[in-house]
Amino acid sequence: MAVLEQAIVNGLLQGGIYAIIAVGINLIYGVLKIINFAHGEFIALSMYLTFWLITLVGLNMALTATIVLLVMSLFGYLIMRILIEPILRDPELNQLLITFALSIILQNIFLILWGADFRSIRTESISYNIAGILIPYNKLIAFIGAIIATITLYIILIRSKLGIWIRAVAQDPITSETLGINARLIRTLVFVIGTISAGLAGILIAPIYYIYPTVGVPFGLIAWVIMVLGGLGSMTGALLASFIIGMFESLIATLYNVELARAFAFIIFIATLAIRPSGLLGDKARV
């Protein structure tokens, strides 16, 4: 029973981390209708920036997070203006190829600049023992940060005027423009917000995972799985799917083996495409 309880707690913590990883790519798709295959590399870039600012410059985490998020917002703006905006009206294949090429380019830039070495941020290995259940400090902080960020973004989308404009552009960009909404500006803001969420994800998980040139690949893939399972463009669905994937991965890794756990996530992905292509809370459009 203690093992099962530990697995459930680990699954909840992992689900929270997955939520902040997936929310950005899901938001971008919901408004721009484009899949950013380089989302994992955005996370990797944030992890590298966090690593260097802490280990080389010696900054504390608060100042590091501020600088990284500012850099990521500028990076997202430039990518949107230079690469994404010109292809928004292009065929879907062109859009996929552009973002996939960006992913490969960023991986090779990381490799050229910092080599293939595995790096990690040295932190004290602290765990809280609550009724026999161990809760790692770094994962707890990442979980809390991810949940706060996800809920904040959800409130902005539902309650604020900016959120109304974003949802209007997502549903009908032409009509929204006739009502005076600057759809171009909203799309840019959404891409920047999505990039910032990737940056935040990188900051939160940098103390947990090793950092290397292709570290973003598994994160990008799991974000894609969560987006499809939850429903393309559905923020609530992405949050629900994050905890489902995190929980099942933890249970299978604990009860069987770690390799099967990640494979099970992709089994869910394939089953979703076959049984319910619109996802748990998605619309009727097929993937």
Image (cartoon, helix red, strand yellow):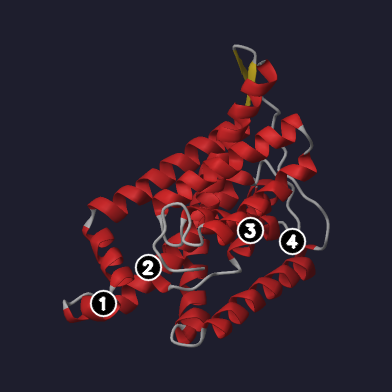
**Which residue was labeled with disc 3?**
270
Mark nearest the camera among 4 and 3 is 3
**Image marks 3 and 1: residues in contact by CB distance under 8 Å:** no
Name which residue type carries label 4. Thr
The kind of residue on which mark 1 rests is Asn
Q: CA distance from mark 3 to mark 1?
A: 38 Å
Task: Give the distance between the C-alpha atoms of the residues marked 1 and 4, in whole angstroms.
Answer: 37 Å
Instruction: Looking at the image, tell me whether mark 4 or mark 2 is earlier in sequence order.
Output: 2
Q: Report which quarter residue 106 is drawn in.
A: bottom right
Would residue 64 be visible to someone looking at this image? no
Residue at the far left in the pictured view: 179
- Going from N to C along the chain, the mark reached first, 4 or 3, is 4
**Image coords of residue 279 (percent x, y):** 48, 56
Crowding at mark 4 (Cα within 10 Å: few <14, some 14-19, many 20+): some
The image shows residue 275, relative to residue 103, as above or below, that is: above
Report the residue marked by disc 2: 189
- Residue 235 visible in the shown view: yes
Return the residue nearer the eye: 139 or 67. 139
Chain-order first, disc 3 or disc 2: 2
Residue sitting at 37 percent across and 51 percent down? 153
- Asked whether disc 3 touches disc 2, contact meaning CB atoms under 8 Å apart, the reply is no
User: Callout 3, which amino acid?
Assistant: Ile
